[in-house]
């Protein structure tokens, strides 16, 4: 190894580039697009990998390469666009660690003109708090579902959009409405408001969505961000088991849509519009959510995943 001193961040970045090139067989152009850098920079990094000893004939075995191999297995198993597996410090730190990884990932893929939609939750709130200050041109951040007055601090979609837009120097668009209204007629009335129409058009133009994944097998069966009993609103067909939720949309163990009796009262991105967003990043972890994450992938609710190592290992065996 030569005398060139690399930082921990450089070692992690160089190891990832080396893994993509030598292990996955990606071209330098593919790596450049994947990591949002120039092809010339990829070429320099590969050269530095050899000079610094990160690469000899094979990639050095260490914790970073173990995570990368786990990422590769999951990416190939589920056909994901991308994945980040995070070695969290403890279960108590899961929101912080996953949020930090999601923030770093978004920073690497962010480009001029991106329109990014957010839902809600503890992990996304942690992501917003740790988002690097990255300034691209004409970036827009939009709220994809309504809010509640009694949301826990900073976990509401509007709070997350506000915090993220500040970090990115982006233009925020808020969905000024409650998550659930009193009637279908009230929803239709709100949808005719000019401010709602403007924001919903922005939602329809999203090219990136960042979402949490709700799990209903191991938690109190409350539709937590709506405030009603989920058993009262989920209309299950024979063989269906309610497993999870993304962006107010319920799904079963195979990712199939579960009919929601409150659908015509919920203020949120409609499912066809959501599924048209090209990059749908799910941020979730811990084994209790493994079945919900699995179903969210199968149902195409997400095509990029940020997850912890334990849950990733479970997903590999499912």
Image (tube, helix red, strand yellow):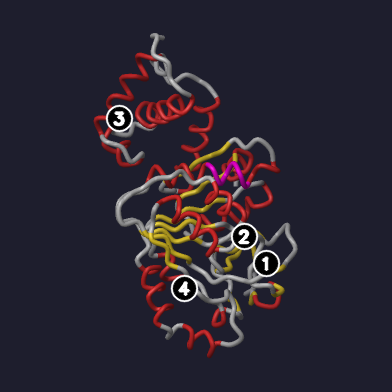
Q: Nearer the viewer, mark 4 or mark 1?
A: 1
* Label pair 4/3, CB-CB below 8 angstroms: no
Where is residue 175 drawn, in percent x and y? 48, 72
Q: Residues within 10 Å of mark 2 (few under 14, many from 20)?
A: many
Query: What is the secondary structure assignment of the residue under circle 4?
Result: loop
Q: Which residue is depicted at the point 67% across and 67% down?
A: 224
* Label pair 1/2, CB-CB below 8 angstroms: yes
Q: Nearer the viewer, mark 1 or mark 2?
A: 1
Instruction: Tell me the quarter of the image containing the N terminus.
Output: top left
Residue pointed to by mark 1: 224
Is residue 96 in the magenta section?
yes
Where is residue 255 drawn, in percent x and y? 55, 62
Residue pointed to by mark 3: 42
Is residue 191 placed above or below 32 in the rendered structure?
A: below
Residue pointed to by mark 2: 214
Nearer-N-terminus badge (4/1): 1
Nearer-N-terminus badge (3/2): 3
Query: What is the secondary structure assignment of the residue under circle 2?
Result: strand
The residue closer to the viewer here, 279 or 315, is 279
Report the magenta residues as a range.
95-100
* Distance between the alpha carbons at the discs numbered 4 and 1: 19 Å
* Distance between the alpha carbons at the discs numbered 2 and 4: 17 Å
* Distance between the alpha carbons at the discs numbered 4 and 3: 39 Å
């Amino acid at each position: 190894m030569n005398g060139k001193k690399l930082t921990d961040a450089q070692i992690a970045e160089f190891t990832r580039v080396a893994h993509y090139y030598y292990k996955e067989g990606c071209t330098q152009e593919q790596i450049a697009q994947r990591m949002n850098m120039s092809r010339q920079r990829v070429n320099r990094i590969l050269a530095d990998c050899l000079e610094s000893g990160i690469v000899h004939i094979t990639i050095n075995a260490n914790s970073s390469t173990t995570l990368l191999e786990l990422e590769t297995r999951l990416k190939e198993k589920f056909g994901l666009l991308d994945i980040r597996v995070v070695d969290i410090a403890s279960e108590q730190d899961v929101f912080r660690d996953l949020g930090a990884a999601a923030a770093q990932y978004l920073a690497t893929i962010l480009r001029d003109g991106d329109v990014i939609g957010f839902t809600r939750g503890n992990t996304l709130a942690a992501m917003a708090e740790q988002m690097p200050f990255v300034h691209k041109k004409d970036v827009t951040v939009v709220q994809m579902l309504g809010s509640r007055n009694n949301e826990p601090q900073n976990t509401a979609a509007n709070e997350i959009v506000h915090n993220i837009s500040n970090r990115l120097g982006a233009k925020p668009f808020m969905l000024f409405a409650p998550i659930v209204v009193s009637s279908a007629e009230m929803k239709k009335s709100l949808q005719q408001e000019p401010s709602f129409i403007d924001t919903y058009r922005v939602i329809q133009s999203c090219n990136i969505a960042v979402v949490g994944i709700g799990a209903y097998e191991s938690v109190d069966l409350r539709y937590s961000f709506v405030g009603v009993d989920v058993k009262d609103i989920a209309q299950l067909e024979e063989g269906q088991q309610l497993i999870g939720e993304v962006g107010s949309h319920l799904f079963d163990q195979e990712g199939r849509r579960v009919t929601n009796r409150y659908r015509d009262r919920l203020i949120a991105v409609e499912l066809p519009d959501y599924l048209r967003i090209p990059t749908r990043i799910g941020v979730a972890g811990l084994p209790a959510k493994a079945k919900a994450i699995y179903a969210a992938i199968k149902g195409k609710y997400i095509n990029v995943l940020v997850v912890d190592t334990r849950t990733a290992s479970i997903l590999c065996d499912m």
